[in-house]
Amino acid sequence: MSATTPSAEAPEFFVRSTHDHDDGHHHETGTMIGFWIYLMSDCLIFGSLFAVYAVLGNNYAAGPSPKDLFDIDMILVSTFMLLFSSITYGFAVLRMQMNDLKGTQLWLIITGLFGLGFLYLEVLEFTHLWHEGATPMASAFLSSFYTLVGTHGLHVTGGVIWLITLLIQLSLKGLTHENQRRVMCLSMFWHFLDLIWIGVFSFVYLTGVLL
Amino acid sequence: MSASSHTAHDEGHGSFRSYMIGFILSVILTVIPFYLVMGDVLDNRLLAIAIIFALGAVQMIVHIYYFLHVTSKAENGWTAMSLIFTVVLVGIVLSGSIWVMFHLEENMMPSHDRVEQFRSLTD
């Protein structure tokens, strides 16, 4: 281990962009691992929300059950919206590696549109449920359902806002060192949200309809 | 850009091929559980749920490997380490909650319907 040298032991709280632009990627380690740790803590939040849903999910309080409420066709469409947005984000990252600013922006815009499509379907579903009387106040099942799926939806909303901000930053400054780091961080965030959605559609929607 | 930093780049961020492999695997792993539910294929519900959960777990691993690029080597293994730690914690939270609450429910006061049900039995 090189930790015995004093310079390696001193923590770096800032990203040095004043020197070595060429191999600057070696300095990204701190930001990327830090963002990964944030994602893991987010994962714990979702883990506990899944646990809440697992415990409360079958207390319908004589109200509607998943079988009465969920429209699996629509969930399939929104699942593919997120999956497509994942692969288009991957293409944006690949374009960025080729130093192609226009390509990166184009794929990021497509990703954002898929994200917005997903959110539109979710809002549509929630308003439909609400009008049928399936509000969070109706039963413990619906309270935990709205909390879990809504938290995921809020994360996607945050991701879309971040994506728009990133597009503005890219158009202002181009593919600078800092912007490349931001693209990689949002990449992790975006793929992570798709990963959580796998849990949601398997556990909440598909299992809910079967039981 | 030097050749050495370019290879480090590819390793961390994936290639077109790896993204496509991940995408195609994800599509297959998404379509099968939806087909099981929408086509009403299996009579055995527990088996269907078990398959849905298993395919969901596999798809999560596909995402982690092909989209999030977590390998034992990335970041000197710290991403993989923190991921394993998180998975263990989530496992404890999930299984522990379900286990404890399942047993607590047995000790709960019966609902109005249940009381009426018992009354009708004793009459």
Image: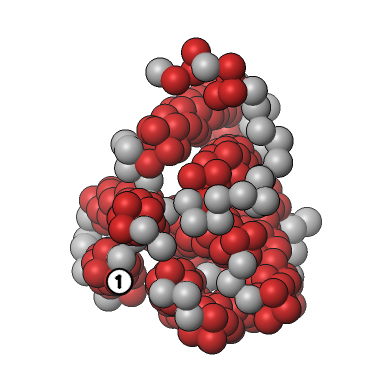
Rendered image quadrant of residue A209: bottom left
Of A12 and B64, the residue lying toward us: A12
Q: Is residue A12 visible?
A: yes
Outermost residue, front side: A19
Where is residue B64? Give x, y as percent.
Answer: 38, 51
Horizontally, residue A59 falls left or right of residue B50, namely right
Rendered image quadrant of residue B117: top right
In the image, residue B74 sits, relative to residue A139, either above or below, namely above
- Residue at point 58%, 39% (across, down): A30
Q: In the rendered structure, which amino acid carries the disc numbered 1?
A: Phe
Which residue has dot 1 on it? B16
Q: Residues within 10 Å of mark 1 (few under 14, many from 20)?
A: some
Where is residue A29? Give x, y as percent.
Answer: 52, 42
Outermost residue, top side: A4
Of B9 and A116, the residue lying toward us: B9
Where is residue A200? Give x, y as percent.
Answer: 50, 57
In the image, residue A185 sits, relative to residue B119, either above or below, namely below
> SS for tag 1?
helix
**Which quarter of the figure is the C terminus of chain B placed in?**
top right
Where is residue A103? Give x, y as percent.
Answer: 49, 84
Q: Chain of mark 1?
A: B
Outermost residue, right side: A137
